[in-house]
Amino acid sequence: MATTNDLKNGMVLKLEGQLWSVVEFQHVKPGKGPAFVRTKLKNVLSGKIVDKTFNAGVKVETANVDRSDMQYLYKDGEDYVFMDTTTYDQITVMNDVVGDAAHFMLEGQMAMVATHDGQVLYIELPPSVVLEVTYTEPGLQGDRSNAGTKPATLETGYEIQVPLFLEQGTKVKVDTRSGEYISRVTD
């Protein structure tokens, strides 16, 4: 248990039998009346975001979420297999839990796996990853500006927009939150 005064971004609350992650919170002390806490909560399982207001100092139930770094091993049918690198325990994570993170995962890559009571809640990747462009149309001579973009397929099979000057075989840094090209990576 914690009070609304203890809220932090990323904290997971248990409200009405469901797990909610605190996205934003703001303590408000109006001129008249009691103080309150305005929050934006994200349902851990469905991803739904809601606004909720609590009176200041009210007790809320927190959920114990274990976050551990695990190595992505391989895809098993529709599911993904991860391994704890310290205990070598393997877990299978369902496709819908991995979600869009699958676009940026390579075998052997590390990811943070969050669990609650043995159930995997979500997968969190680093803010950016380096992937190789496996296919893109060649850029035309003279297309050296930043103005245009073209589609490129990454080694994971995901397609992003890249600048016209990039060629097949180039390594690029990609934002895992938005799926956008960040920069070219030179070895």
Image (cartoon, rainbow, N blue to C red):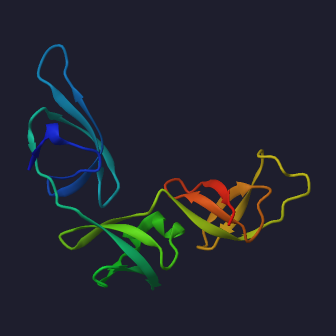
| Image position of 21 (left or right of 133) | left
| Image position of 41 (left or right of 5) | right
- Residue extending farthest to the right is 141
- Residue extending farthest to the front is 187
- Residue extending farthest to the top is 31
Residue 133 visible in the displayed image: yes
Q: Quadrant of residue 86?
A: bottom left
On-image quarter of the C terminus: bottom right
Q: Is residue 26 above or below residue 16?
A: above
Q: Residue at x 13, y 32 (%)?
A: 55
| Image position of 46 (left or right of 72) | left
Q: Position of residue 7 (x, y in %)?
A: 20, 42
Q: Nearer the viewer, residue 97 or 74?
A: 74
Residue 78 visible in the displayed image: no
Q: Quadrant of residue 33?
A: top left
Q: Position of residue 64 (x, y in %)?
A: 17, 61
Q: Position of residue 176 (x, y in %)?
A: 51, 58
Q: Position of residue 137 (x, y in %)?
A: 80, 66
Q: Residue at x 20, y 33 (%)?
A: 37
Q: Residue at x 43, y 66 (%)?
A: 99
Q: Is residue 5 above or below residue 20?
A: above
Q: Residue at x 15, y 53 (%)?
A: 62
What is the number of callouts on the image? 0
